[in-house]
Amino acid sequence: MLNLVNIGKLKKTEYSGKEPKEDDFNFDLIGHYFKNKDHFASFQTIDNQLINDLDLQELFMYIDRTHSKIGQQYLYNQLLSINRTLHFEEQEDLINYLTEHKEKRIKIQSLLSKLNKRDFYYISNLFLDEFISKPKWYWVVRILSIAGIATLLLSFLFNKLFILLLIIYIINMLFYIWNKNNILIYSDSIPQLMPLCKIAKEFVVMGIIPKTKIQILSSANSINGLKNQIRFFKSKTGVMSEIESVLLFFREIINIMFLIEPQIVFNVLGKLDKKRNEIHTLFEYIGKIDSAISIASMRTNIPHYCIPTFFNTNKITLDFTDIYHPLIPDCVSNSLQIQDKSILLTGSNMSGKTTFIRTVALNVLFAQTLNTCFAKTFKLSQTRLFSAIRIADDLFGDKSYFFEEVLTIKNMITESLSDCKNIFLLDEIFKGTNTVERIAAGKAVLSYLTKLENNIVFVSTHDIELADLLKDTYELYHFTEVIQEEQIHFDYKLKRGKLSTKNAIRILEINNYPPQITEEARRLSTELEYNRQQADSTAGQ
């Protein structure tokens, strides 16, 4: 996994927030909006397998130039959700507007930074999570509140009632303490609604996304109506004067005597429960603005990028030039045009096969989520992505590497029969089993995945035999190394055809393996290759 904090500084631009952040990235909090949002209408939501295979958390750390926690959550959800309709007009219009109006953009970034405290992560809880409900015995609170008022008034007429008043006060104090826990649950989220509303209204006044003006103002004003009650959720911190301390003391006595806070708390929660849509509307409004600035900032700090071109055809369209991986310094770019066939890559370790597959996949994803590709041109159809690159043993579930791979590929087989266009990414298929069965099962699966014309496969392999078996249905490409002056050099360039050179034993020699090992390896390699050719010749007769 890459540590983005150690990546070198990028060139300066007129955007602030132009470089990868050096913050701590808490993906439990960043991903809360994505994990709990309803994705029922999405074309695809990216699963943990693909997140891990494409290093998407590290990629997010690189592209994230947001100024607020709300924008950060929104951008993360945007990256991992492919919508059914790929309309990015609003985003691009906003990017162009903010690029042209530098002073407004700087002011917007300054306002967004006021929403960057950790507590603003929790605003999404207010429209995604269930609120605590009143306990069944809550009616006791109302009775005790009325009893407190009545006893206080009557005690001035009947002195003996002061004893009863003291008893009620002690009981009410227990309820008061219990309610403080309820306030604590929401002390990180509810108080942040006021600055959210304030900044959203300021953006409306500035004319940002004008078509939403009425909706944003209506939502903000609706929540502002609870302003006085929301203050009960705010933690009382900081240095207070003596007068403020005395006033606070007497206010707490009144709260305890009449149980004001418990009633206000559940009253506010009940009202906020009916304002989930309004809170969500303001959240997405702020998120759209912050993510647009972040995408624009990222674009200005990469070697080159393009806005993708989408085609609506029966077959998958995938055509790109000078594609590269943004996390690899001085990454070698490659170009490719898919022509009815899937892609099978051969090559030695470290030659670039897996990195190329990841690069294609992340660009397909970014095209459909952020409307941005790390390439000079990128043309595609809307498509889903499925991967089997990093497979891990499930030690606790007692599942081997091979069994986990079998389950992952089985899911691909199921998805390949859907009406959607799909891209499947596989690295060294079935490498957890023996050579003969690996090649046989691999060939059968890879042929099956391309049975329908709406599927494309990118697969890497060391098995030259697999390339021979699939040469009619797969385009063969390879990466290779060159040995010069006892040194291994990689050019990381995609080349047509299967790998024809064999340098593994030569690399052992360069690394000073004992001659008896390398000589025996060469002898056995020659024998095995001769036997394979003889078997192929016999089978062809």
Image (cartoon, helix red, strand yellow):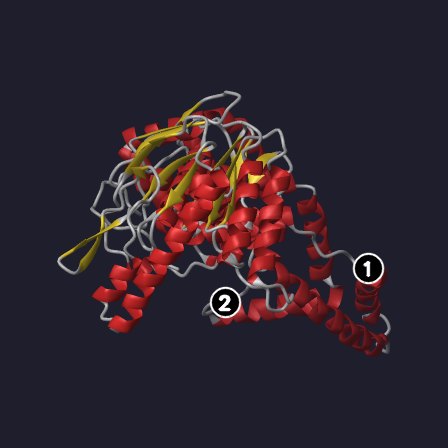
Q: Can you identify the residue that label 2 sits on?
A: 237
Residue 465 percent location from the top left of the image: 44, 46
In the structure shown, which secondary structural element does the residue marked by tag 2 occupy?
loop
- State which quadrant residue 204 falls in: top left
- Left or right? Give the position of 9 relative to 219: left
Q: Which mark, by number, is residue 397?
A: none
Q: Residue furthest left?
A: 485
Position of 319 relative to 424 (above/below): above
In the structure shown, which secondary structural element does the residue marked by tag 1 occupy?
helix
What residue is drawn where x is 45% and y is 30%? 341
Residue 112 percent location from the top left of the image: 40, 45
Decide if residue 228 is in sight here: no
- The amino acid type of the residue labelled 1 equals Arg
- Which residue occupies the foreground of this view, 201 or 346? 346
Q: Which mark, by number, is residue 142?
A: 1
Position of 515 relative to 304 (above/below): below
- Which residue occupies the foreground of this view, 463 or 142? 463
* Mark 2 nearby-residue class (10 Å; few <14, some 14–19, many ≥20): few
Residue 250 percent location from the top left of the image: 63, 69
Position of 90 relative to 225 (above/below): above
Decide if residue 18 is in sight here: yes
- Left or right? Give the position of 467 relative to 248: left
